[in-house]
Amino acid sequence: MTEASTNPRKTPLYDLHVELGGKMVDFAGWMMPVNYTAGVAAEHKQCRSNAALFDVSHMGQVELHGNDIAAKLETLCPSSFGKLPVGKARYTFFTNPQGGIMDDLIVANAGDYFVAVVNASMREQDVAHLQSLDLDIHEIDRSLIAIQGPAAETIVASIAPAAADLKFMETGLFDLLGSECRIARLGYTGEDGYEISLPNDRAVEITRKFLEHPDLAPAGLGARDSLRLEAGLCLYGNDIDNDTSPVEANLVWAMQKARRENGGFPGEERILNELANGPSRRLVGIKPEGRAPARRGVEVADTDGNIIGAITSGGFGPTYGGPVSMGYVASEHSAEGTAVNLLIRGKSMPATIIKLPFVAQNYKR
């Protein structure tokens, strides 16, 4: 969680969270539910077995209008957008001149304009960064909810039947109870699901309607974090940051072939060099032995006691059934099955490097 803000903002769903028993905390300058009365583990399992609803209205939603949007975006991101079909979304990231990741985001081609969704903690930086382009940039004031889990399609289609036809990373405009809403089939849990952009004045009504479905329950930030960790998904500020390259973070899949070969983005010298010669460290999954979780900041040592890296995210995985961690280790120690030790409160605890994710992703492709 972030440090408390002086005057944290409230999403249009704030009162509904309180009514539903949400424990509200300051997160990235917004009052958000960390969990409800069922608790983090129950909310996590609800998402994996049926479906959970998350309020993600603190995220920044930005429209990009103008000429040559795709080409201009490529000056900030190492992904390709020129051939991104209308109605398709793409995961990408801004890189800095040193080859680090300024933030990760989702970009979608909406036809005659593009839409971007950026992280809450970085939204001011990201909007300003986009405004450096010769484009008309609009940060739109709308609510955003995520419905995630194997029952998500049935739940969303109960109000917007055509949304069932969307595949993973596809988006479009749909009618929800008389309001035009953008629905995208994606999310941050590793499960099938949707993110739905709603008018603020209809957000509570539409959310309540979804929650009438017996397979859906609300979930908070705690479950969102444990779900994404099991799914091996990076959290900006923990697993990726201004010092981390996409190659180190195993995010090369988000860089299309032409960008990997030709560059033309900030930090290309470092990134292309790491693509050719390998990075000095890599992001890996780490499975501690026993039941005690290893959390962010715990040092990782080889079996001789030499420090080779550190945990960036860690906790207990309710679906995995044990502690789960991810972090960076020196590349020569990153092979699956490598034995390592975790230095926790002065004690050396055995662990093993494993392949991410801990729990298989379940997207509808």
Image (tube, grey):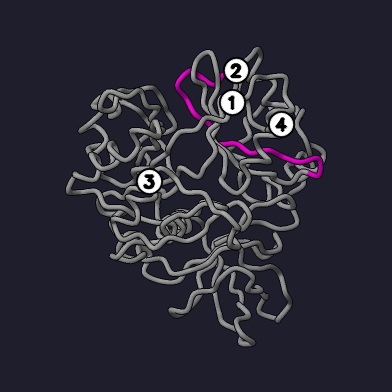
- Badge 2 or badge 3: first in the primary sequence: 3
Question: Relative to 264, is 303 on the left or the right?
Answer: left
Q: Is any part of residue 336 visible from this angle?
A: no
Question: Relative to 20, is 194 on the left or the right?
Answer: right
Is 91 contained in the magenta span?
yes
Residue underneath mark 2: 65
Q: Position of residue 200 (x, y in %)?
A: 40, 34
Q: In percent of the image, x 54 and y 53: which residue is there?
A: 8
Query: CB atoms at circles 1 and 2 under 8 Å apart?
Result: yes
Query: CB atoms at circles 3 and 4 under 8 Å apart?
Result: no
Q: Nearer the viewer, mark 3 or mark 4?
A: 3
Q: Whole-Å distance between the Cαs marked 1 and 2?
A: 8 Å
Q: Which mark is residue 138?
A: 1
- Badge 3 or badge 4: first in the primary sequence: 3
Residue underneath mark 3: 13
Residue underneath mark 4: 76
Element under disc 1: strand
Q: For the N terminus, give its image quadrant.
A: bottom right
